[in-house]
Image (cartoon, helix red, strand yellow):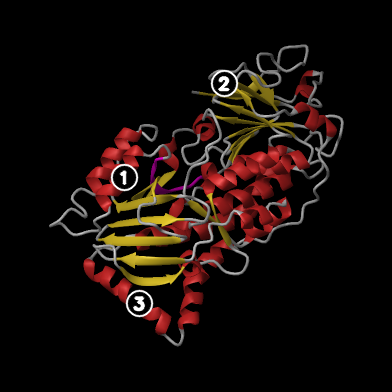
Amino acid sequence: MPGTVSPSSRTSPRTVLISGASIAGPALAHWLHRYGFAVTVVERAPELRTGGYKVDIRGAAVEVAERMGILADIQRASTDMRTGAYVNDDGKRIATLPAAIFGARVGRDDEIMRGDLARLLYERTRADVEYVFGDSITSLTERADEHEHGHGHGSGGTGGVEVTFERGAPRRFDLVVGADGVHSNVRRLAFGPEEQFVRHLGAYISAFSLPNELGLDREELYHAVPGRLSCVYSSAGDPAAKGLLTFRSPRLAYDHRQPAQQLALLDAAFKDVGVPPSEGWTQIPRLLEAARAADDFYFDGLQLIEMDRWSRGRVVLLGDAAHCASPASGQGTGMALVGAYVLAGELAVAGRGPEEAFDRYEKELRGYVAVNHALAEKFAKDMTADTRRQIRFRHLMMRLLPYMPWKNLVAKKIAEEVQRGANAINLKEHPAPAPAPAAAAAAGHARAAGHAPDAGRAPATGRAPAAGGPTYAA
């Protein structure tokens, strides 16, 4: 693309705004900084979000973590889960298996709390990347290549995106990345309402912290009744426990930013479960109370995000914002890490414009995403059983498995589908140059909204930005 400046140029690195400071955003920021880009990450939350459930790092994501230099950190922060068990209504363990079988992990695969991984990525990037917390994008306006108008600007003469914020002053960036999750604000601004991209998989899930009154030590307990599944677990190094509640349901109407509405739906779904004489685990009422008291309460549908394109002009989507596979896939975090690696690598190729880079990024990831979407559809159905008979059969198979002479083959079969999804991409080798001095100078430590470098002033072009692009506004 005429006028594009290679990120290998040490005199004028391109500027990138990333929306979202969970996993995909900081992972992308890590790679882009290494390739010489100047990166800003904006996050709606007032501070880093460190809650969430445990997440798996499998297959290609393990390789990406190693290339990032964080694999050893992930291993040190491992949940170190030992066993998983199904319990009856009174909490008695009726079927127990090694945690690796429950998690379908093999080889160097590992598991880490989402919050621990988010903190790790943030700490690895905060000195080189500008973080702006407590703010959000309100509009995106693309500008034409200024070479077409006979003059250049400080980014090497390329076009860019004018961005307005809820709190901070408008700023201009060469590229904007939406890494802001399944309910992506950037996707809504650039592509339209969320509803047109969502496919509901027929269930909802909630996660939250609670006191470890069951005394669990790196163990997870599951209980099932028709259409509903509950879980409590405790991981290494965490004195608290985590609760998970899943229930089957058609798509429900609620505001994803209103926990009170979500708690009401959760209460309705588990009403009378575990309350004698009704069936169910007697811990369920306690779990519902813990959900109401938790400061890290999470609730959402099991749903896929399906889009024909992940980019529009100089705006591109990453991770769940582009292709959420839902928690049912067990692959969301791995897909975020892999996607960040691929996108940064394609943007780093000298002489390649953003549209070509985005096309190659999509081409490389589409097959990987498709396999994991298919896994999510299957596992979403398997998470909750329809009848008591199905539940009893599942318990029987789990009780018998440790005594079967072919148990290793069965365990391998259980893991095969997940591993196929985790390894459904061949990663390219991308060179990783040292960060450009100009990029490092342009970035700063984490700051509150309105106190970042350049906040409150427009880019120093000396003239009004060129017209010629669409505006995406709230």
Q: Few, some or many C-alpha atoms within 10 Å of disc 3 (few <14, some 14-19, many ≥20)?
A: some
Residue to which mark 3 is pinned: 399
Query: Percent from the top left, x then y, of residue 438?
Result: 82, 30
Using the image as rendered, state which of residue 59 and residue 200 is in the foreground. 59
Please state which amino acid type lies under the numbered disc 3: Arg
Helix or strand or loop: what does disc 3 sit on? helix
Residue to which mark 2 is pinned: 165
Of the residues tagged 3 and 1, which is closer to the observer? Answer: 3
Mark closer to the chain start, 3 or 1: 1
Say which residue appears at 51% left-offset and 40% top-offset: 181
The residue segment tinted magenta is 297-307
From the viewer's perspective, tell me whether residue 53 is left or right of residue 10: left
Residue to which mark 1 is pinned: 251
Helix or strand or loop: what does disc 1 sit on? loop
Say which residue appears at 27% left-offset and 70% top-offset: 390
From the viewer's perspective, tell me whether residue 462 is left or right of residue 309: right
Residue 299 located within the stretch drawn in magenta: yes
Q: CA distance from mark 3 to mark 2?
A: 56 Å
Residue 430 located within the stretch drawn in magenta: no
Helix or strand or loop: what does disc 2 sit on? strand
Say which residue appears at 58% left-offset and 60% top-offset: 110
Q: Few, some or many C-alpha atoms within 10 Å of disc 2 (few <14, some 14-19, many ≥20)?
A: some
Answer yes or no: do the residues labelled 3 and 2 have beta carbons within 8 Å?
no
